[in-house]
Image (cartoon, coloured by chain):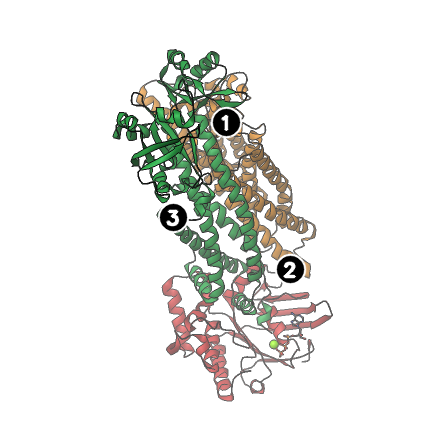
Amino acid sequence: MKFNLYLLEFALFSLIRKGAKTLFVFLILTFLIFLLASVLFISDAIKHELNVSVAHLPELTLQRLQAGKQVNVPLKRVEPLLEIEGVASVIPRVWGYYYFKVAGVNFSVVGIDAFEQSYKESLQKVVDAYDVKALEKESGMIVGAGVKKILEENYYQDFFNFVTADGKWKRMHIMGSFNADISLQANDMILLPKKSAYEIFGMPENEATDVVVKVSNPEEIPTIVSKINQLYPDMRVVTKEDIRVSYQNIFDYKSGFFLSLFVVSAFTFFMIIYDKLSGLSSEEKREIGILKALGWSMDDILKERFYESFILCFGAFLLALALSMAYVFFWEAPLLRSLFVGYSTLKPSFELPFYFNMPMIVLLFLLSVPVYIGSVMIPSWRAAMLDADEVLR
Amino acid sequence: MIVLKNVCKCYETEAQRIDALRDISLHVKAGECVILKGASGSGKSTILSLIAGLSKPTTGDVVVDGKRISKLMEPFSAHFRRENIGVIFQRYHLIATLSVRDNIALPLIPENLSAQVMEKRVEEVMELCAISHKSSALCRHLSGGEQQRVAIARALVNEPKIIIADEPTANLDAVLSEQFIETMYDLKKSGVTLLIATHDSQFFNLLFVDQQIELKNGVMLS
Amino acid sequence: MTLTPEIIAILMLDGLFLFFSSIAFVLSLKLYWSWDSEATTLLQYRLEKESYLVGLIIKYIFMLKVPLFLFFIYTCDTLSGIITGAMCAAGVVNSVDFGLFLLLFKLLNLYLFGFWLLLHVRDVESELQPYVRQKSLFFGIAFFFFVAEIVLEILFFTSLNISKIVSCCGTLFSASTQSSLSFLFLMENWMIVSLFYASFILMLVGFMVKNGAVYLFSNLLFLFFAIVSLILFFSTYVYELPTHHCPFCLLQSDYYGVGYFLYAALFLGTFYGICGVVIATLTKGFILRAMRFSLFFNSLYVVMVSAYVVVYFLKNGVWL
Ligand SMILES: Nc1ncnc2c1ncn2[C@@H]1O[C@H](COP(=O)(O)OP(=O)(O)OP(=O)(O)O)[C@@H](O)[C@H]1O
Ligand SMILES: [Mg+2]
């Protein structure tokens, strides 16, 4: 059977002839698909970014738990950990959050050490670029781009006064700032010498917040984990995989929750509107009657209607896709992004990396086009089965 | 060619039952010209729509060209109509927002012909009905007589064996009606079967009319 | 319960299908009881139009079901990333007790809907639509299978538990005793493979003598042995690993998604071989055409799987 181009052409002109009604449906449809696409693009981009940053994480992070709460790890545990076979390095970390009351945001404060390898490559690059010893001497710090912006807004041009755990002022000079490639994580970060970090947090210097373990062969992770568990039963071992899964879950959940709410409400709304619109005008009824009298079968009319809705829907789909790509990747998704990165006002200022894949387009297609086609199916059938004898009377 | 056997058609609405046709039997041979006449509401259009397969009789049989179209189901009855029957409506029923050419091409769309054949057929009937000079004008900009000619062209474009016309001259003046009758005469000469429902007296004493059937309240009088 | 966008899409479409297929079901029942092609009643004219709607709905569902089946597998594949232990769709499907049933129902329903559509095509080809009552009855029954599939699918996605540790395909499709499929591995490879080729030869014979019954029977056998031999024998040649037996990993891009082609060929071949031949017999249609279609795709399948073995042998000079 040859594809009937005339019918397609007729459908296209019939859409144009309907004018305002077509435009209205087209715009609503475009808007709905646009929202849907934007949400998916944003969540996928974030997931992608997280995956990339997780890939740089050390294989194992050890936290000490006491009464179910995370507590500091004594530094003397580092040596025994290093002796476990297969462990390449053990890095104690000193880090935490510092709440900046005036701006109402949290900074992540990370202690760095001149003699220690950093636990993350990107961090190491930043550390390498500065003289850590000089930082120690002059009580300086390096801040992420987002932090710098916030501080400047609050008139801290080249230093910042931390309030330590004892309630004293601790002045730190801003020696530089960085724009890390993985902006999501580094944006709210402050790097300062470990000594200063201990002071600000009021932590004893023979402890660390947690310990990071690098493993030479990933295959050995399960054995190493069980050995660590034997050695220190109070330590929880978080693997890279665990982190990745939990991140993915958070974002799947967030986008999923939003999506389901959205899909249900948007499309019911749409159905209601469409139902109101799809009542055939007497002009349309007459037209169908004429066509049937001229020898069009129900099949032809259904096909024509199907082409109409497909053109409309596919056009809206493509347009919405283009729009949402521009909106998310070019304009950085104003408004919508805050839905996903709500934990700190600092974090929304990250950049969304361009990330685009085929399965996602398929997903988007499945979420939108079948629903529309389904919603026009019964009205089209009603139109096609109209009695044609009315035109002959 | 066309046989109606004891055809009854009744419309059932909530309020009442209307017997539009009661026990109609008629026989039309190929190439004949038949006039259906009768007062308004007597059932002329109903007979035509039964013959065209647009509606189905309540009882009885309609056989056209050997096919029981009263029992023909959807895609086949449409197919049959497309191949064999051309319809001219009372109010022309052109699609106002399409051009003359597009209106005439409407019956050919489901056929999915090649572009050349389609173009050729449309040109031919436009020539025949003397409407070529308006081929790309929108139908709503046409005069009544021009619309009539487009309607005829559209009915002829699928080269039907049977032409059904429902009060074709109701909206035309005497001169245009004359022209229409001449076109019908030409068609009859080329062997087309004509069925014309009308109460225009101009038709009643034409020489080429083979049968005149008078209806009254759904019953045949002669 | 996890709500990834993929799962939402599937669940939403399930809801849509349920809605439309219920309409089709009710109409089918009506058609079955009241259809009388000789009647000239208003009811009959209405039914003729409604039978159109049934066809429309089922076409719509089938058209989406085919890509959705692949999408389902794909979704399970992506879920294997967040479900501990799962390496591919196999682990995810098996993380729930009835996972395998769900998959079987999905496949079965593809055959059933396809069968209905074939019957429908034969039906509307004829001016009298002689099979309306048969196809309505058929759908009336198939509807329950379809609902079962949807219910299972909803249960499946709502009871997926990310924190539960599942086994990967390596243990599922192995001879180890705890796997539910271990009984398959009791059979010798050479036996299964020769049975597979034997059923194909039987099919060829059936084709040559143009015997529908033989052809149909050989197709049923062929379908069964094709799947078993794929798991036991042919898949190892695709992976070039003697211990890897998973029928799902074939779908992954590491193997160029060859699984999609294999399964498509196998499905089309056996579909025409089983449903096509049944329909052709019932409706006195062109049985040869169905057989030819079927044979083409089945041969394609045989050639594809055999090629993997032969190429491996040519390259390495040994059998796995
Ligand atoms: N769909 C319908 N429902 C109810 N009654 C109908 C319907 N269609 C036609 N009728 C009735 O059938 C009768 C015959 O109608 P028909 O259109 O055949 O008349 P007609 O002879 O063509 O009249 P006119 O000359 O006015 O066109 C009328 O009484 C009309 O009211
Ligand atoms: Mg009339």
Q: Colour of chain A?
A: green
Q: Assign a secondary structure to mark 3.
A: helix
Q: Tell me the shade of chain B.
A: red
Look at mark 2 in the image and give the residue it sits on.
Answer: C45
Mark 1–mark 3 Cα distance, whole angstroms, equals: 34 Å
Q: Is mark 3 within 8 Å of ligand 1?
A: no
Residue in front for this viewpoint, B68 or C297? C297
User: What separation in Å lies between label 3 and label 2 (alpha carbons)?
Assistant: 50 Å
Count of number-bearing discs: 3
Q: Can residue C182 be spotted in the picture?
A: yes
Q: Chain of mark 3?
A: A
Which circle marks residue A325 in the picture?
Answer: 3
Looking at the rendered structure, the kind of residue marked 1 is Gly
The first of marks 1 and 2 along the sequence is 2
- Residue placed furthest toward the bottom: B174
**B9, above or below A315, in the image:** below
Query: Does mark 1's beta carbon lie closer than 8 Å to ligand 1?
Result: no
- Of the 4 image quadrants, the one containing the C terminus of chain C is top left
Q: Quadrant of residue C49?
A: bottom right
The x and y percentages for residue B67 are 58, 63
Placement of C127 over or under B165, stated as above or below: above
Q: CA distance from mark 1 to mark 2?
A: 52 Å
Out of C221 and A300, give the one closest to the viewer: A300
Classify mark 2: helix, strand or loop: helix
Front residue of this view, candidates A284 and A198: A198
Name the residue at 67% across, 53% down.
C35
- Colour chosen for chain C: orange
Residue C298 pos. (x, y %): 45, 34
In the rendering, which numbered label is found on residue C91?
1
